[in-house]
Image (cartoon, rainbow, N blue to C red):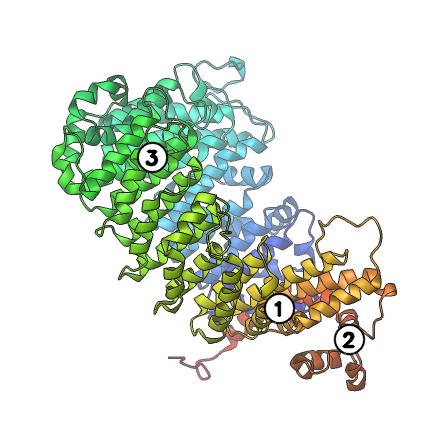
């Protein structure tokens, strides 16, 4: 804590403790607590140095008229300070903890009726219970009864905080040596057990064992209660605690839970179904799941059979993800996931194909048919099934009982139904009319199809591309579905390593003329991705250059929609890389120069930022790839100048990225590099070569770009420029003895010398006359770039959120009287 904070802290404590002072905004108090949290490390003499904190907590907790917000803050602060053993003993010696947390003092207070105070009390205890002494304090004072009561508080915030504290107490067992044995089948010495509780007292914290049993009894009673909220809170506590308890505690907790869950399941407590699933999934992630004849497996099987189909599928998906899941349970879960899809798409005479899997699935056939016959539930079921299939495919969980080829054909059938294509008859034929044109199901099916592309099956590929082309060509395809169909087509093409069929270019020609700008945009994006992947494929190059697609894409550079113009730039930037490998009379080299000049015009004239950003990114792509670049030097100079003067900060950042590529390439030619991963040369390069490289960078106006960026008002721009200049400075420092510092790169005539850089050099006591003779090398050596980088790395609110600033805000807010308060509205 600095001297300014030490000076302000007593004043702030006095102001906050004064009930006559009002604090309109309590957000600063939460930030204040965060700051104290960082100061209360073990061994910290915080309370010895700042006794005003003890005075503040004592005064507020004993006050009958304290503001609830301030009182809540004081309780949280007391818990935070008592989290260390040193702080606990100091506060206990001053009787602070008793006045803050003993319930007898609160039971008759009207302040306790305020949920803010109860919340502060619970959070304070939660912060405090970090060591054995605080745990002992909590149980000796009987506070566990209050916490258990607050678990069902009328304020959900208080109830949730109490539940978190109870879970923390149960999980605290990992930090103690208390030994708890099972009531049934315990291996502990019976003479050391409480006959009524089944626990062994630990001399270090005997109260903890009794307290654990009190929580266990409360959980058991709550789960048997007719009050739904009580059962709900205890189920949440069990789900939160099972994974982190000591083994003995976990088994005791599960013993008291499983019977209640079985009973509640039998009573069809649908409101608690989600919590049942969470408890079972939490238990399944513990060693309890691996025990012989585990009741968890039985309960999961029961839930798979009794849940509604829309609940069963997500539950089954969770089961599939469990480690050490028994094969029989995984088989049942897979059947639940696949059954709706199979029932809709498989012909009646093939339903028996997977009869074993269906029986293992457990869902009632009639129940599924009923859900599938209703439009909303049918769509929900299919989407859940299809989404889970994507997960199954990613995990390799589709096995021989349900061949991947069969699943792919089922997904294709769903896509056909949705687009109105005929398929074989189905037992649930009435569902077809509910699916036609349903974009939600179409998108889920396309996602599933993409996830299944890893299949080694070659038989279904023609079926896949057939239905995908149908979607791409159909005028009724929704624009978002079309975009997804493009991505799935690309995925399958890349996996199969086959060039696109010629029919695809005909579809692209059609889609690039679509009235909907979203369709034109996604078609151009697809073209760019296709060209990026297949630009070295001879067949693709021939088909693309003869299709007319590049020419049509060129016309879209003037599209009225800026997103489309940007996508056209990306697409043309990619397609220009298709080389003339087959003697096609179209020169990619000439097209590159033509495009470069056109892109420079766009950068200078387009009023929308998307196209301008795209231009910079395409030039970056060209210069960083093995593409002919002889015609790019003059356009690159223009791009660097225009990009560095752009009003959009992203354009400027991308321009600096382009500059970085040029710097790395230029220095690499002279045997230098700004990359820390570059391989060092066998012989040291000469200073003349480095000087020549710097002259070339000056010719490209890169230093103008860098220094303009260094003093840019947008922090990301300045950070990027500073980082690049630091790399250059490192190279120059290593080679300064070999260079002519005065002769390198005259800076005169550059606009930035006259403003920002000039002012900055003056702050460094570099006179105007000296500036006139300085070159880039000297400027770089004079600038304290390391300090500038550190300053730029600080967040913009580091001053506003500093402890000193927080305390000044608190003092200012509480000192403000009604006379000088301003209504900002």
To which residue does mark 1 refer? 718
Q: Is residue 143 above or below residue 797?
A: above
Instruction: Name the residue: 30% across, 55% down.
Output: 511
Residue furthest out toward the bottom: 769
To which residue does mark 2 refer? 775
Which quadrant: the C terminus?
A: bottom left
To which residue does mark 3 refer? 388
Task: Work out whether residue 751 or residue 759 is closer to the camera in this orientation and state it.
Answer: 751
The answer to whether 230 appears left or right of 602 in the picture is left
* Residue 544 image point, x, y percent: 41, 51
Instruction: Name the residue: 74% across, 70% down.
Output: 695
Element at label 2: loop
> Do callouts 1 and 2 mark residues in contact (Cβ within 8 Å)?
no
Task: Work out whether residue 713 or residue 191 is closer to the camera in this orientation and state it.
Answer: 713
Q: Which badge, 1 or 2, is on the more N-terminal residue?
A: 1
For residue 797, what is the image quadrant? bottom right
* Residue 69 image point, x, y percent: 45, 61
Q: Residues within 10 Å of mark 3 (few under 14, many from 20)?
A: many
Element at label 1: helix
Alpha carbons under labels 3 and 1: distance apart: 46 Å
Q: Which badge, 2 or 3, is on the more N-terminal residue?
A: 3
Alpha carbons under labels 1 and 2: distance apart: 21 Å
Res 269 visible: no
Alpha carbons under labels 2 and 3: distance apart: 64 Å
| Front position among marks 1 and 2 | 2
């Amino acid at each position: 804590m600095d001297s300014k904070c030490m000076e302000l802290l007593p004043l702030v404590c006095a102001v906050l403790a004064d009930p006559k002072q009002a604090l309109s905004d309590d957000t600063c108090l939460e930030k204040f607590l965060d700051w104290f949290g960082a100061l209360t490390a073990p061994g910290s003499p915080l309370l010895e140095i700042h006794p005003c904190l003890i005075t503040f907590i004592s005064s507020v907790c004993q006050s009958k008229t304290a503001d609830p917000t301030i009182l809540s803050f004081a309780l949280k602060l007391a818990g935070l300070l008592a989290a260390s053993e040193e702080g606990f003993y100091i506060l206990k010696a001053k009787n602070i903890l008793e006045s803050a947390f003993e319930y007898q003092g609160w039971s008759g207070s009207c302040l306790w009726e305020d949920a803010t105070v109860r919340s502060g009390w619970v959070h304070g205890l939660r912060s405090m219970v970090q060591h054995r002494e605080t745990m002992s304090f909590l149980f000796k004072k009987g506070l566990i009864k209050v916490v258990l009561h607050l678990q069902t508080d009328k304020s959900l915030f208080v109830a949730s905080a109490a539940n978190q504290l109870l879970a923390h107490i149960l999980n605290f067992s990992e930090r103690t040596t208390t030994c708890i044995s099972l009531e049934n089948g315990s291996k502990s010495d019976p003479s050391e057990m409480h006959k009524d509780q089944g626990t062994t007292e630990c001399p270090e914290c005997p109260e903890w064992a009794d307290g654990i049993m009190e929580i266990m009894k409360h959980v058991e009673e709550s789960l048997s209660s007719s009050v739904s909220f009580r059962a709900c809170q205890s189920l949440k506590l069990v789900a939160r605690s099972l994974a982190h308890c000591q083994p003995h505690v976990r088994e005791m907790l599960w013993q008291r839970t499983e019977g209640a869950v079985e009973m509640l399941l039998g009573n069809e407590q649908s409101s608690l179904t989600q919590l049942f699933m969470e408890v079972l999934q939490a238990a399944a992630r513990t060693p309890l799941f691996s025990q012989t004849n585990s009741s968890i497996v039985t309960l999961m099987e029961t839930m798979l059979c009794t849940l509604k189909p829309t609940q069963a599928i997500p539950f089954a998906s969770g089961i599939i993800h469990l480690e050490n899941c028994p094969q029989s349970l995984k088989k049942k879960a897979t059947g639940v996931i696949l059954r709706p899809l199979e029932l809709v798409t498989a012909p009646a005479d093939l339903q028996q194909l997977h009869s074993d899997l269906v029986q293992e699935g457990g869902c009632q056939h009639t129940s599924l048919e009923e859900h599938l016959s209703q439009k909303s539930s049918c769509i929900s079921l299919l989407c859940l099934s299809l989404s889970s299939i994507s997960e199954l495919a990613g995990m390799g969980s589709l096995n021989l009982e349900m061949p991947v080829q069969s699943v792919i054909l089922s997904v294709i059938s769903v896509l056909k139904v949705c687009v109105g294509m005929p398929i074989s008859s189905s037992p649930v034929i009435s569902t077809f009319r509910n699916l036609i044109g349903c974009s939600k199901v179409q998108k889920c099916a396309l996602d599933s199809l993409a996830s299944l592309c890893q299949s080694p099956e070659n038989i279904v590929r023609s079926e896949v591309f057939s239905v995908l082309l149908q979607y791409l060509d159909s005028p009724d395809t929704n624009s978002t579905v079309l975009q997804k169909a493009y991505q799935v087509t690309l995925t399958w093409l890349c996996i199969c390593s086959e060039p696109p069929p010629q029919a695809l270019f005909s579809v692209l020609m059609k889609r690039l003329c679509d009235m909907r700008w979203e369709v034109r945009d996604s078609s151009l994006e697809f073209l760019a991705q296709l060209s990026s992947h297949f630009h070295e494929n001879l067949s693709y190059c021939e088909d693309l250059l003869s299709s007319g697609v590049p020419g049509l894409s060129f016309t879209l550079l003037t599209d009225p929609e800026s997103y489309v113009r940007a996508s056209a730039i990306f697409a043309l930037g990619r397609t220009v890389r298709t080389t003339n490998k087959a003697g096609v009379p179209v020169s990619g080299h000439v097209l590159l120069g033509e495009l470069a000049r056109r892109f420079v015009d766009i950068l200078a004239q387009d009023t929308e930022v998307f196209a301008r950003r795209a231009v910079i990114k395409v030039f970056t792509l060209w210069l960083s790839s093995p593409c002919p670049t002889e015609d790019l030097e003059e356009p690159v100079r223009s791009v660097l100048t225009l990009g560095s003067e752009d009003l959009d900060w992203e354009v400027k950042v991308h321009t600096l990225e382009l500059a970085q590529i040029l710097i790395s390439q230029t220095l690499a030619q002279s045997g230098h590099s700004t990359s820390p991963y570059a391989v060092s040369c066998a012989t040291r390069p000469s200073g003349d070569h480095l000087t020549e490289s710097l002259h070339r960078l000056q010719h490209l106006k890169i230093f103008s770009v860098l220094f303009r960026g260094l003093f840019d008002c947008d922090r990301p721009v300045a950070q990027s420029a500073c980082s690049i200049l630091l790399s250059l400075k490192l190279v120059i420092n290593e080679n300064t003895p070999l260079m002519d510092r005065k002769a390198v790169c005259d800076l005169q005539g550059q606009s930035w010398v006259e403003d920002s850089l000039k002012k900055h050099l003056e702050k460094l006591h570099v006179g105007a006359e000296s500036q006139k003779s300085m070159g880039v090398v000297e400027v770089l050596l004079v600038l304290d770039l390391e300090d500038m980088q550190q300053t730029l790395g600080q967040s913009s609110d580091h001053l506003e959120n500093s402890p000193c600033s927080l305390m000044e805000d608190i003092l200012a807010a509480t000192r403000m009287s009604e006379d000088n308060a301003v209504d900002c509205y």
